[in-house]
Image (cartoon, grey):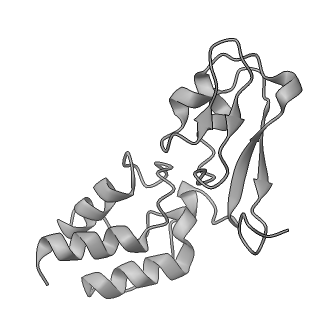
Amino acid sequence: MAALARIERLDRLLPQTQCGQCGFDGCRPYAEAMDRGEVGVDRCPPGGDSGARALAHVLGVPALPYDRSRGTCEPPQVAWVVEADCIGCTKCIQACPVDAIVGGTKLMHTVIPPLCTGCELCVPACPVDCIELHPLPSGGLDAG
């Protein structure tokens, strides 16, 4: 398999949370590093053990459980801004790797749920702790 096709396949297997728990700035750079043999398949907590197995299969290497020291494999979640507490500082917007948060300076912000990957990067960025993570409904965002 050509390197570019293998990288594409690895990237598609990753959860696209862009959370950085693997030590890279996103899923694509992690896929590229795996393809180059620089890192193992066990660095993605959001992908869990099944994700690590799938990555190992593509690369033809032994399967490993994901490295739990990097984080935990959580059910899908979405960020939620507590409107009454938001001060409009824009720090969450700056921290969001997928542009799922909108708002303006000194105005309340909101999350666009279908875009949110639940990466949690906005939570520590918020100085007033007004961001909560809610479980994604089992049927996805259209459930309910």
At a point 38% along the width and 45% down the height, the residue shown is 25
Is residue 87 visible to us here?
yes
Rendered-image quadrant of the C terminus: bottom right
**Is 109 situated above or below 27?**
above
Can you give x and y, in whole percent of width and height, for residue 44 in the image? 48, 63
Q: Is residue 128 left or right of residue 92?
A: right
Residue 114 sits in quarter: bottom right
Residue with the most extreme top position: 106
At a point 62% along the width and 19% down the height, the residue shown is 104
- In front of the other: 115 or 75: 115
**Is 67 situated above or below 82?**
below
Residue with the most extreme left position: 2
At a point 55% along the width and 63% down the height, the residue shown is 45
Can you give x and y, in whole percent of width and height, for residue 56 in the image? 35, 82
Q: Is residue 84 left or right of residue 133?
A: right
- In front of the other: 144 or 47: 144
**Is 23 situated above or below 102?**
below
**Is 89 situated above or below 100?**
above
Is residue 41 visible to us here?
no
Rendered-image quadrant of the N terminus: bottom left
Q: Is residue 132 left or right of residue 17?
A: right
Can you give x and y, in whole percent of width and height, for residue 10 in the image? 32, 73
Can you give x and y, in whole percent of width and height, for residue 23 in the image? 40, 49
